[in-house]
Image (spheres, rainbow, N blue to C red):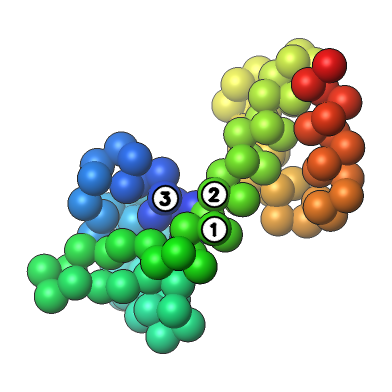
């Protein structure tokens, strides 16, 4: 969820800092700080001296995959009549548990 949020914020703001992530996700800044440093240790992001957060290639790939799932599932739910807010809230929940096979089939089916 953090990687997707950083990806979205980079698109919206350009430069992302921990405070931006905390605001967007509704988490405390200390909680975000702990997770952001863990993501840096795992090689998904880099944190600049000015506090700016940038996705590294491995983090970007995961973020893009999750963002695509979120977007496609949200669009599918909206297309069957679910209101926008509910569709994207539910998509956020579904995107983390759906198998790659099921997602690919849904995406293919609803493209038609």
Q: Which numbered disc covers residue 81?
A: none
Q: Are marks 3 and 2 in contact (CB under 8 Å)?
A: yes
Read off the residue under disc 2.
64
Q: Nearer the viewer, residue 67 or 94?
A: 67
Hey, which residue is sitting farthest front in the picture? Answer: 57
Q: Position of residue 39 (x, y in %)?
A: 44, 76
Hey, which residue is sitting farthest bottom in the picture? Answer: 41
Q: Tell me the quadrant of the picture where the N terminus can be found.
A: bottom right
Asked if 45 appears above or below 54 in the picture, the reply is below
Asked if 74 appears above or below 48 in the picture, the reply is above
Disc 3 element:
helix
Q: Is residue 38 visible?
A: no
Read off the residue under disc 1.
61
In the picture, measured across the screen, residue 101 lies left or right of residue 30, that is right
Q: Position of residue 84 (x, y in %)?
A: 60, 21
Disc 2 element:
helix
At 81% from the left and 43% from the top, the residue drawn is 103
Q: Which numbered disc covers residue 7?
A: 3
Q: Nearer the viewer, residue 95 or 89?
A: 95
Labels 3, 1: front one = 1
Hey, which residue is sitting farthest left in the picture? Answer: 50
In the picture, measured across the screen, residue 31 lies left or right of residue 69, that is left
At 87% from the left and 26% from the top, the residue drawn is 109
Q: Nearer the viewer, residue 42 or 31?
A: 42
């Amino acid at each position: 969820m953090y990687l997707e949020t950083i990806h979205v914020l980079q698109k919206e703001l350009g430069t992302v800092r921990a405070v931006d992530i905390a605001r967007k996700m509704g988490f405390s800044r200390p909680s975000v700080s702990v997770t952001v440093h863990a993501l840096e240790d795992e090689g998904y992001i880099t944190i600049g001296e000015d506090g700016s957060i940038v996705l590294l290639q491995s983090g970007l790939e995961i973020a893009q995959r999750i963002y695509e799932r979120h977007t496609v599932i949200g669009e599918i739910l909206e297309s069957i009549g679910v209101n926008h807010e509910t569709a994207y809230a539910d998509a956020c929940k579904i995107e983390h548990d759906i198998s790659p096979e099921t997602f690919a089939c849904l995406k293919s089916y609803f493209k038609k």
